[in-house]
Amino acid sequence: MTKNRAIRILVWGIMLVLLFPFPAIAKAENNPTFQNASVHDPSIIKVKDTFYVFGSHLAAAKSNNLISWEQIADGVHPGNPLIPNALEEMKETFEWAESETFWATDVIQLEDGRFYMYYNSSRGDSPRSAMGVAVADNVEGPYKDLGIILKSGMVKEPSEDGTPYDATDHPNVVDPHVFFDEQGKLWMVYGSYSGGIYILEIDPKTAKPYPDQGYGKKLLGANHSRIEGPYIQYSAETGYYYLFLSFGGLDSVGGYNLRVARSENPDGPYFDSEGNNMIDAHGPEGSFFDDKAIEPFGVKLIGNFTFQSYKDHGTEGYVSPGHNSTFCDKETGKFFNIFHTRFPNKGERHEIRVHQMFMNEDGWPVMAPYRYTGEKLKKIHQKDIIGNYQFINHEKDISADLKKAQNIALKDDGTISGERTGTWELKDDYTAILKIEGNTYKGVFLEQWNSVAGSEGIVFTALSNEGKSIWGIRDLDRNDEEIVELTKKELDLGDTSEVTSNLTLQTDGISGAKITWESSHPKIISTEGKVNRPAAGEKDQEVTLTATISKGEAKATKSFIVTVLAEVEGKLVAHYSFDGDLEDRTNHVDAGKVVGEQINLPGGKIPFTDGKFGQAAQFDGSSGILLPEGLIQDDSYTVSLWLNPEELTEFTTTFFGAQTEDQWVSLVPRGPVNGETMVWSGEEWFDGNTGMTIPSSEWSHLAFTVEEGTLNVYINGEKKFSDSGFPNVFTSKKAIFSLGVNYWDQAYKGLMDELLVYNGIALSEEQISTYFKTGEIPLQAGSIDVSELEKLIEKAKQYANEDGQYTKESFQALQEAITEAESALPTIKSEEDLKKAIQSLDTAIKGLKLVEKKPDTKDPETNGDKDAVPIKDKNDPDKNKGKEEKQKKGKELPNTATFMYSSMVIGLLLFISGIIWFYVRRKVSIRK
């Protein structure tokens, strides 16, 4: 074979590889670019070529492609362009609802070309709500109020239907959706929890309900069943009206999930895929939030889930997806579901997501597993389907648990193997029929952008007659060795340099790989990750954890060095009195630093004014205080402060601590749950609701304690909340802390005084109550152990100079240091003071100098070089040890001998170098 021929073959081979990539997972030429926005309860409307979503808290966003979203409004405040002065404009609504924010809004364009916003506000802890309508010439506002159209939660006056209001039967007038049916009638469906979901007719000329309808017609729900967010969409493809609903609680632990039922008429009756009449979807009489009673109803489209991740390309998973709207594009025939969702390990942060839906053979919508990136149904080849998949079954439960992906394979013989077994079939161009463990699922195969793998890939989505949705995403085809190596690469324990709490040791790897653990010191860290810290005063402990990853015959190991910090003695670690400065009065930690409107932004100013005790820090709503890192390093602690809020804004923090941006604790005067004062925590979500909201413009004392997972919250000396299961957040010395600001929310506006932080101590209810009544700070005095200094003083006094063996200057310095240390004993108030006193005295001891002996002093064993030894060396074993070690070294050379020896060595080296140079030169000359 010639050289040129070999080159040609190589070039053609490369071209073939480039032209014909692996068909099932071909790398996309252009990765989709997402721009996310946060709108809770998004309701969609298309105006010309732009999509808009409107939601709770007067939030809105827009997009021209359903992929990249621009936030255009958020929050009820004077600067919001939708309703610039909502608190005044809708004053009657807010007064009735005893609230200062809006819940889910809906916008529709009526025949006059104007845009009508159906808004609502609710107290939250009861169905006391009001719904109204506002109008604008432009979809982006400003909207002008047309007044209240419905009320609920009344006590002494008749309800909308003339009877006494019954919260188990009458609706909570929130979550509206207004739509035209196929005959041109205008309807509004609405409701949340309480008495259920209702529908009534709207007059398109006035945009208000026709008279004498009361609350309208009930479609489903009663007895406080957790059903809300109704949205009705007609499908010309099937001729049905589809009622979309959210079941469960909306927060990250509420098990929120999307369901659908259908009817031939807009006002029902609605049925699910099993033929259940949705009017029966409610808890029994006398029940409250009975999720088990409603779980069997509706077709569940999506709930909590997570796919196995490939960190190089990100992860995929949703938590509490819900409160959706839909859009049918008449030009393209595409059917979209628009909803908000939270995410695994991200707390309550939420974003808009858009997924495409498709009708299966039985006329039920199935949802694509991935967010929309422009994909469309097209012919799929059977050979492209064969391969490994990650599989999700959404089941029918209402649960906060994440449905984790299982590993299956769709084989070329039409069977399904792996963690689920069955058969699969491709019908026509893309219709999917899967039979898995006795259940038949009907849906579609399609190609989608796989955000887990970072490439295009085959997916399937299908639905059973029982109303259970399944998804499959094509997995990367790897052998066992590659899977083990990838798992090893991704396996990570995070920062293990300062561990103070239990570790999460992963036991499941990618694509069925298993992980087992060994510990070099099981008493400190067990193989399950349980950490037992060394006692206070002991040294930190270093432990090696070794993971063994295996799949089939393939194995690999990976080790981690973990430093477990010793426990610390509990104490009052910081006291910020704000008396004209940001100094810590305990002298344990540094002063606070002023920051801007977020914890990581510069700027801001914190002046001081009259406070609860002396002066207080004054926060202006755009400034905060950054406290020193590592204030709290234990699973037991106490935080106490006095607050006088000028404004009570939702989510605003007063005391904030974070190990990471996702792992945090926040003390909030007005929280997201019914506007209550609360302590809440992100990542492992926890709400410590007090059942009340502290008042503005007056002083309140707030304190919370955490002790090995039990959270107690106190207001004005009274315990308002107590429960276990609170997460251990501050797991190293690197946690950050702030006052009045966090990473996201509106900064605090008001006064703050007397911040106390205890590390390693959870104050008792009695101690907190006593402090509230008397102002006497608990455990302020006597907490410093000075015994180490006392022992060092006694040691220093053992040194004497009767024989004059020490120089006068060094011995006098020691005596002065002893006097200084004895004087400091009663004044030490901090660990820093103690450390300085010990260091000063120890330096004086080490600074003692021996008087030089006369030259004629001989010692037969040491050739006259005898060390001077203090009289009381027998009381200082360290001195004797030093003497013995020196004597073992033997005779040392005098300085002149050392110099002569060094000169000889240098001379010898120069001589050898000269010989080598001469030899090299001679060789070169010969060659020439």
Image: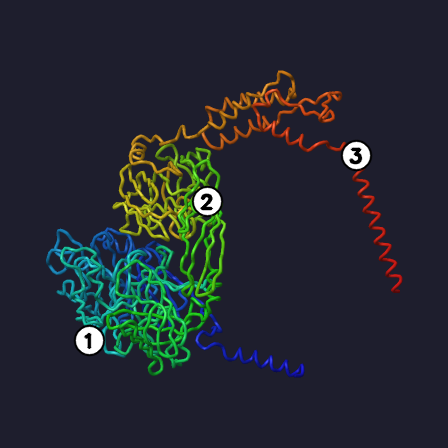
Q: Earlier in the sequence, mark 3 or mark 2?
A: 2
The span from disc 3 to disc 1 (Cα, nearest Å) is: 112 Å
- Residue at label 2? 564
Q: Mark 1 or mark 3, which is nearer the start of the sequence?
A: 1
Compared to residue 103, the image places residue 629 above or below, namely above
Q: Which mark is residue 671?
A: none
Q: Amino acid at mark 3?
A: Ala
Q: Which residue is depicted at the point 60% across and 82% down?
A: 9
> Tag 3, which secondary structure?
helix
Q: Secondary structure at mark 1?
A: loop
Q: Residue at x 41, y 66 (%)?
A: 511
Of badges 1 and 2, nearer the viewer stands 2
Marking on residue 897? 3
Q: Which residue is mark 1?
A: 264
Q: Secondary structure at mark 2?
A: strand
Say above or below: 731 vs 56: above
